[in-house]
Amino acid sequence: MQIKQTIGQFTAARSATSIKLFATVFFVLLANYLFFQSPIGSTIGLFCILLLAAIWYFQPLKHGVSRRRLAAIGALLAAASMIEAAHWMQFAVFTVLTTILALLPKLPRTIEAPKLLMAVLGYFLKFWLRIGTDLSRISKIKAHAPTKFSGARVLGTIFLPIITCAIFAYLFYLANPIISDFLNKLDLTRVFEFFSIQRLLFSAFVMLGTWALIRPHINNKIPIVKASVISSDKPFYDFLFNQNAVLLSLALLNCIFAFQNTLDVYFLWSGAELPKGVSHAQYAHRGAYPLILTALLAAAFVLFALKNKENNTRNAQIHTLIYIWICQNIFLVASSILRTIEYIKVYSLTEMRIAAIIWMGLVAIGLGLIIVKILLRKSKAWLVNANSFSLAAVILVSCFVNFGSIISWANVQNCRQLGGNGNELDITYLASLGPSSLPALIWAKAHAHDNEVFANALGQTITILDAELRLNVGDWRSITFRQYRLSNEVGHLSQ
């Protein structure tokens, strides 16, 4: 009996509006202390973990526990990655995943990934209205026990006066010299600094965002955009994607792809000498991105062809040709990745080229998932959700990778000034990567004894980046775990 009462009290606490209001105020005060006019560091990750815990605590005990856990684990990884290194991408991933976590109990159990993302996008557009709606509802609730303390009633009473008084007091302070002189004599400048317009806007944004996450609300009717795909029951589709046409198309396409892949095997993978006037860099650069577009169009063709039930279930020859063609496309993507790597060897590594390689890998995964879909007779929704999961997993893993360090070391060790086979080192670009490139630049300076101009340019960049690193690690609120390790590594290399 006692256990049931405890569970009942715990469940009631989840839904108590007053507790959610106090939690929102707590996060607003904490955000002001940690982030307002302060550099962002690992504290953003700790703040996000606390917020995630609050969202999970206030979640109603409804269906979809496995999906909630998956979203919570992803959000936790994104928050942990911000302890490692704070970046807008990790915060964006955390925001999307926590919003999904908050909305899942309000959505159908079998919702597809695109519809889920549409619901999240719609919630982003109107989340700022949520607290206003709730405060309006709270103000209309009649007091059944006038002497009973209610945090919701107290906050609903003082919220608007505090905000409006603070705003107008500050405006009058700026506009009226008599008031400003009087208040300056009282030395209340710190008070008005605290209630500045910037701080009020910052606090309002944190308050609205936090409240929308711990007390979410969404319309039961989710807007669904119908894809403008030609249905299989239309004459034109039946005419265009009939069995014979699809069978012949796949046969010819396999031949064309086989020819392209054979050329790649001979010139790219085996390292054979290219025709005169064509360098490996040109061969790599001209083919990388068009081939990825080719693979995407191939995937679209397969999906369109399989919309015809006869092609999807009755024709084994079509399935066999599709398997061969998708495998050829996967090999084509692998060749595109190798082309990009060869191009990087001649020129240099950049963030965009790393992103291109990751994107190519995702395309290859998507093509492989099409084979799984056909073999296991999975639905189109399964394919979309599986690709969405792959994308989310890659983004979360990328949050923990220091791409700036990888790029700087690769370019430094391959640069022409230090005896490498690549181009001259672009010091300006490495400087734009921030302090992450410091260890590679320090190493390059130590090995640039015979090139005084190069060593001086490196020294100037190292001085600037080292000052930036010291500024970041000077405040415990702005330092991240990656910056801490980087500071120790730089100190060791500088000795």
Image (cartoon, helix red, strand yellow):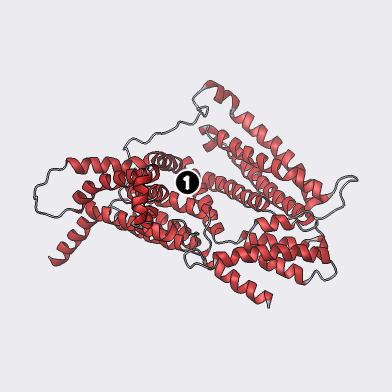
The quadrant of the image that shows the C terminus is bottom right
* Mark 1 nearby-residue class (10 Å; few <14, some 14–19, many ≥20): some
Foreground pick, 235 / 313: 235
Left or right: residue 430 versus residue 88 is right
The residue sitting at 29% across, 45% down in the picture is 165
Look at the picture and state if 456 lies above or below 23: below
| Rendering coords of residue 312 (x, y %) | 53, 37
The quadrant of the image that shows the N terminus is bottom left
SS label for mark 1: helix
Outermost bottom residue? 495
Look at the picture and state if 88 lies above or below 290: below
| Rendering coords of residue 46 (x, y %) | 42, 63
Three-letter code for the amino acid on which mark 1 is drawn: Asn
The residue sitting at 86% across, 49% down in the picture is 274
Quarter of the image where one finds residue 342: bottom right
| Rendering coords of residue 333 (x, y %) | 67, 48
The residue sitting at 11% across, 46% down in the picture is 143
Outermost top residue? 235
| Rendering coords of residue 468 (x, y %) | 60, 63
Quarter of the image where one finds residue 111: top left
Q: Which residue is mark 1?
A: 385
Left or right: residue 205 versus residue 329 is left
